[in-house]
Amino acid sequence: MKIAVFGAGATGGHFAVLLAQSGVDVSVVVRGATLQAVRSSGLTLRTDSGDIRADVKASDDSRDLGVQDLVLVTLKSHALSPAADGLAHLLGPDTPVLFLQNGIPWWYHHGLSGAQGSRPLPALDPAGALWQRVGPQRVIGGVTSRACTVLAPGVIEVKGGNRSLMLGEPDGRDTNRLRDAAQALQRAGFPVETTGAIRNAIWSKLALNLGSGPMGVLAPVPLKDLFAEQVLVDARLRIQAEVLAIARAMGCDFEIDFAAQMAFAKRSTHLPSIAQDAAAGRPIEIESMFLAPLRMARERGVPTPTLDLLVTLAALKFKASMSPSDLNAQ
C-alpha cells in the first residue's frame, strides 16, 4: 500500500514513522530543513520506550511521488488551501484523502442532509481550492489526540498513552475505503475506531483544544502550570460547556469527562500546539479553532461569553506579535 503523508511535522512525522515500520510504502511531502533532515537521516520518533527510526521517500514536490492509495494530510488548517494543487498530484481516480486537522474542517457540511448539505466554508477554503482540486467526495475525516512535538527537523517526540484515533466518512457510511484506511493504521499500531458520527469526535476534540488553546496563547506555559490556577480551571469548565452547547445546536453530541481531563492536564508538561506556534511566531489556526465555531454559535443563537472574551484577547495578542507579511499568511 502506498501512503503519502502531506506535512511531516509533529503529527505527520509520527504517523509516517509508524506506518513505515509496519511495511507501508510511505512518502512524505515536506520542505526546508525538514526535507534535508529526512533525506539525510530519515525520520526519528522519540517515545517513552525508546527511539524509532524510519527511512521514507521525501520531496517538496508531490509530483515526484506519484499516485497514492491513500493520502494523509496533517497540515495546519491555514496551510491547506495553498496545498490544494500539490495534493491533487497524488490522487488517482479513487484515492481517498484522510484529513487530520484541529477545529472545524473545510469539508464540515459535506454529506449532511437538508439545508446544511455540501455548503462550502469560504473562510476555511478560500476560493474553493480544496473543494475543486481535491473534492469533498474524497474526504475521510479523522481526529487524533496524541501529544506530539518537533524537537528538531526530522525528530518528533510523542508523549502520553496510545489514545484512540477516530475515522469516519462525512456522510456516516461504512465504506471499503474507510475500513482499508483503518486497517492500515491499526497494523501500524494505532488504536483506530471508525464512527458513523465523525463530527461528534471533531467537536469533542475542539472542546479539549478550546479548553486550553486560547489560555495557552495568552499564557504560554505547560498545562500543569496553567491549571494550577483554580480560576483557569473554572474558566475551562465554562468554555467546554459553551462548546458542548454549540455542538448540540449543530446536531452533534458528546460527553466530557472533565475530572479525567483535569487529572491529566495537572500532570502534563505539554504546551498546546497552538500555543507553541504562537510563541514561536508561526501562523496559528485562528479560523478553524477559534472563529469558525464562534460563527456557528452566532448562527444558532448560542451565547458563548467566556469563549468570546478569551478568543478575542488571544487573537489580539497574536496579531500584535506578528508582522504584516506574517498576518497575510493567516
Image: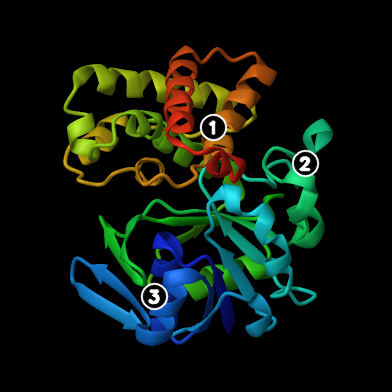
- Residue bearing mark 1: 253
Q: Nearer the viewer, mark 1 or mark 3?
A: 3
| Real-space CA distance between mark 2 and mark 3, rounded to the nearest whole angstrom | 34 Å
As measured in the structure, the alpha-carbon distance from the residue carrying label 1 to the one carrying label 3 is: 32 Å
Residue type marked 3: Leu
Quarter-wise, where is residue 237 in the image?
top left
Q: Quadrant of residue 139?
A: bottom right
Residue 173 image offset from top left, x and y in percent = 69, 55
Observer-nearest of 66 and 266: 66
Badge 3 marks a residue whose secondary structure is: helix
Name the kind of residue labelled 1 in the image: Asp
Q: Which residue is mark 2?
A: 120
Identity of the residue drawn at 27% across and 57% down? 161
Q: Secondary structure at mark 2?
A: loop
Position above or below: 245 against 103? above
Q: Is residue 188 visible?
A: no
Image check: 118 left or right of 157? right
Residue 243 image offset from top left, x and y in percent: 49, 26
- The residue shown at (40%, 63%) is 191
Residue 86 in the image: state x and y as whole percent: 68, 68
Q: Alpha-carbon neighbours of circle 2 within 10 Å: few (<14), some, or many (≥20)?
A: some
